[in-house]
Amino acid sequence: MAFPQPKPQKPELPRKLLRTLECKQGAVRAVRFNADGNYCLTCGTDKSLKLWNPQKGTLLKTYNGHGYEVLDAHGSFDNSHLCSCSSDKTVVLWDVSTGQVVRKFRGHAGVVNCVQFNEEATVILSGSIDTSIRCWDCRSRRPDPVQIMDEAKDGVSSVKVSDHEILAGSVDGHVRRYDLRMGELHADYVGSPVTSVCFSKDGQCILASSLDSTLRLLDKDTGEMLGEYSGHKNQACKLDCCLSERDTHVGSGSENGKVYFWDLVEGSLALTLPVGGSVVQSLAFHPSEPCLLTATEGSVQCWRADSYTAEEIPG
């Protein structure tokens, strides 16, 4: 006798403020979950990175080694290493447990906006205002990048990596996807400087945010526009966009101190989250749960679904 499958739970959005982290590192430029979502990274204008347990609000470690403000960071799949980039034109590889700098990579001619490990954390990819993406071998002692991708005609604002693809957004208004297996480059022009890009969880779509206060959902293979989302304000700042953990909603920070979520399929506005009085520059959605991190000015907020209870916090 076959038992009926349980009905899937209706997707929830994080509406309840669980905790605020006062980061004390100047303006927070980026907040990022680690691979399993138990910890998060913040980087700021005081040249530091910080590792947090956002559920408990505890600071675990501070990493110092950049010469100027840190703009982005990313954790490896096994949580053993971090990479970060800065206005000092460098990319840094860190050992998580010791807090020490493992390698510093120099080669960009300008501010490095974004950084990302590949899936195996053997290569770091960085995007810069010098219009290039550079690939750095974490295991080699060679000072030069193993590859340079310089197809962009203006600064590279955002880089994301899948198992065989590199996705990049540029101020020249293009979203570029490098297919490493096929050796192909696909470019889509959205008409306005791109501030943030990301893959959908199913790997079929691309989300791009741009300075015309619009998010666009593109079919990865054809470049066809599947949806447009607007209502927030993004005209001057580099703001993050994201998809929820089940690809049901599209989210973005805003210059009016709020976070906006839209239904991915219908395009309707599903949630407006008041965060603060300043720009919500960075946000990160938990990899598997309805949990959101937002960064505005010098603090980070951890948001949970209404059904979440504090007793669920792991010890």
Image (tube, rainbow, N blue to C red):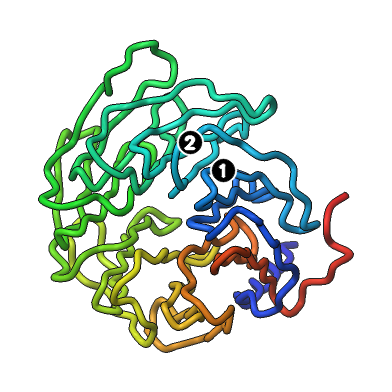
* Helix, strand or loop status at disc 2: loop
Q: Residue at x 56, y 57 (%)?
A: 26
The quadrant holding residue 143 is top left
Pick whichever, 305 or 2, lies toward us. 305
Classify 223 as above or below 79. Answer: below
CA neighbours of label 2 inside 10 A, class few (<14), some (14 to 19), many (20+): many
Q: Which residue is mark 2?
A: 66
Alpha-carbon distance for marks 2 and 1? 7 Å
Residue 151 screen position, x and y as percent: 12, 43
Quadrant in which the N terminus appears = bottom right
What kind of residue is marked 1?
A: Ser
Residue 246 screen position, x and y as percent: 53, 65
Q: Which residue is mark 1?
A: 48
Q: Residue furthest top?
A: 141
Classify 269 as above or below 315. Answer: below
Q: Residue at x 27, y 28 (%)?
A: 107
